[in-house]
Amino acid sequence: SLNTSELILCDYCPKAFHRICHIPQLLEIPQGEWRCCECSALLYKNKQRCGTCIECTRVDCGECTPCLSMKKFEGNGKYGKPCIFKRCKYMRYAAPEHMPQVAKKRKSRNEEGRAVGSKKQQLAS
């Protein structure tokens, strides 16, 4: 069980957090040097969705322009924006508590350093 009287001190600022108050919640005390959510946020270059508001937890409508371009709705996937009903009003630099980041695929490169297309494109040429 969580001891709510325990405070965890950030190694990079003077702040202290209860384990359950930190975003994301800390299930155990971190080992070694530790950076709080606010100090970690300084490392992010782009804001992220909060992951908890109504907009973030809503399903894609499947009818707006961004949805129709998504591959799951048989689009080409090039629009790259979220459903118009999923636009978070509480964007922040800190990582969301319940929405893990998805790693983007890196394009492979040929010997000259140029990006190589998909296998379909390679087979067609």
Image (tube, rainbow, N blue to C red):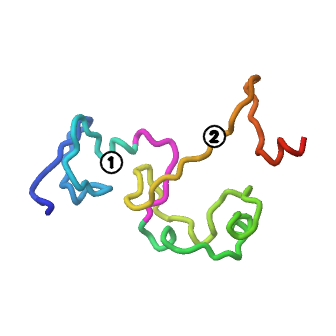
State how far apart marks 2 and 1 are (Cα).
27 Å
In this view, the residue in front, 40 or 72, is 72
Q: Is residue 12 above or below residue 3?
A: above
- Residue at 19% in and 48% down: 29
- Percent x, y for residue 95? 41, 52
- Percent x, y for residue 102? 52, 52
Position of the N terminus, as image quadrant, is bottom left
- CA neighbours of label 1 inside 10 A, class few (<14), some (14 to 19), many (20+): some
| Magenta stretch: includes residue 50 | yes
In the figure, is residue 39 to the left or right of 78?
A: left
Position of the C terminus, as image quadrant, is top right
In this view, the residue in front, 1 or 78, is 1
- CA neighbours of label 2 inside 10 A, class few (<14), some (14 to 19), many (20+): few
Magenta-drawn stretch, dominant element (helix, strand or loop): loop
Q: Which residue is mark 2?
A: 106
- Residue at 63% in and 40% down: 106
**SS for dot 1:** helix
Label pair 2/1, CB-CB below 8 angstroms: no
**SS for dot 2:** loop
Of callouts 2 and 1, the N-terminal one: 1
In the figure, is residue 1 to the left or right of 67?
A: left
The stretch of residues the image draws in magenta is: 42-51
